[in-house]
Amino acid sequence: MHVTEVIKKPLLTEKSYLGHANGTYTFVVDKRTNKTQIKKTFEEIFEVKVQSVRTMNYDGKHKRLGRFDGTTSNYKKAIITLKPGEQLAILNDL
């Protein structure tokens, strides 16, 4: 899998913003990737050292709008913890 396909987008919520002070960042990643691939890709793109990666798989929720039924997309979330002293300058501006 190519480097640009692994990390899709940052997941920006109130809870994820609280983790920025501790060096933890949350991203939506491709469902086919594993923790090792996520760690290598993150270190290569952002040039930081990763301490740990935690992943969670989420199923889409059933939604209804009027007479139309559907589900939201399934996704995989990765919580990435950086080693002490490391910091992401890119996401701190958000």
Image: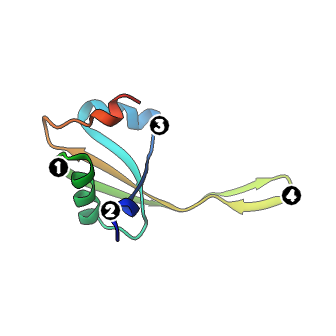
Looking at the rendered structure, the secondary structure element under dot 2 is: helix
Residue with the mark numbered 3: 13
Compared across the picture, whether 70 is left or right of 40 comes to: right
Q: Where does the image place residue 43, in percent across and percent down from the top left?
A: 21, 52
Q: Which mark is residue 22?
A: none
Q: Which mark is residue 67?
A: 4
In the rendered image, the residue lying farthest to the right is 67
Q: How is the image coloured?
A: rainbow
The residue type indicated by label 3 comes to Thr
The residue type indicated by label 2 comes to Val
Crowding around mark 2 (Cα neighbors within 10 Å: few <14, some 14 to 19, many 20+) is: few
Q: Where does the image place residue 47, in percent across and percent down from the top left?
A: 20, 47
Looking at the rendered structure, the secondary structure element under dot 1 is: strand
What residue sits 82% from the left and 59% below the top? 68
Residue with the mark numbered 1: 51
Is residue 43 at all visible to an observer of this figure?
A: yes
Crowding around mark 1 (Cα neighbors within 10 Å: few <14, some 14 to 19, many 20+) is: some
Q: Where does the image place residue 60, in percent across and percent down from the top left?
A: 58, 60
The residue type indicated by label 1 comes to Gln
3D distance between C-alphas at marks 2 and 3? 25 Å
Circle nearer the N terminus (2, 1):
2
Q: Where does the image place residue 21, in percent across and percent down from the top left?
A: 27, 29
Circle nearer the N terminus (4, 3):
3
In this rendering, which labeled residue sits more in front, label 4 or label 2? 2
Compared across the picture, whether 55 is left or right of 83 comes to: right
Residue with the mark numbered 2: 3
